[in-house]
Image: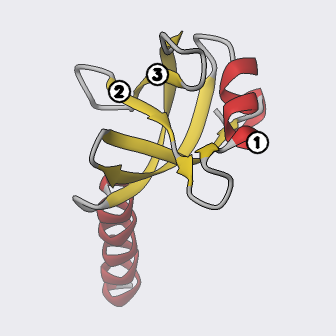
Amino acid sequence: MRKLIAVALSIALALQVFALGSSDGGLVVGKLTAKNETADGKNMNFEVLAPGEEKARKYHVVFDQKLKKTDPKILEVVRSAKVGETVELEWIKTGHGPAAKSFKVLPKSQK
């Protein structure tokens, strides 16, 4: 029984570390609290409040080097998301701040 508890705690700790991410990127699940089109209309800035956080973190959609523009698939999903919905995003560190390289709205059953 003790071994089972130790394994469960180890898994929980590993998941917590994964959720926090590293300084180069990570995975975040939280509530979309704000979103704004950039001045040139080519990208979106948005904020996500993760559980346990006091302040929402700011993100933008990643730039696709092959297309030479913001990733259109991710941009479309971010634009269609509604403030207040629970979202999941994978982000990476860029010179312009954290950028979402994947973004999806979670169904209400997964909240």
> Which mark is first along the chain, 3 or 1?
3
Q: Name the residue at 52% across, 45% down.
A: 62
Instruction: Tell me which amino acid carries mark 1.
Output: Lys
Q: Quadrant of residue 10?
A: bottom left
Callouts 3 and 2 close, C-beta under 8 Å: yes
Mark 1 lies on residue: 73
* Location of residue 83 with respect to 98 vertically, above or below: above
Question: In the depicted view, which residue is nearer to us: 85 or 61?
Answer: 61
Mark 2: secondary structure: strand
Instruction: Tell me which amino acid carries mark 2.
Output: Lys
Gap in angstroms between the C-alphas marked 1 and 2: 19 Å
Q: Quadrant of the C terminus?
A: top right
* Location of residue 108 with respect to 62 vertically, above or below: above
Left or right, 11 with respect to 88, comes to: left
Mark 3 lies on residue: 45
Question: In the depicted view, which residue is nearer to us: 91 or 73?
Answer: 73
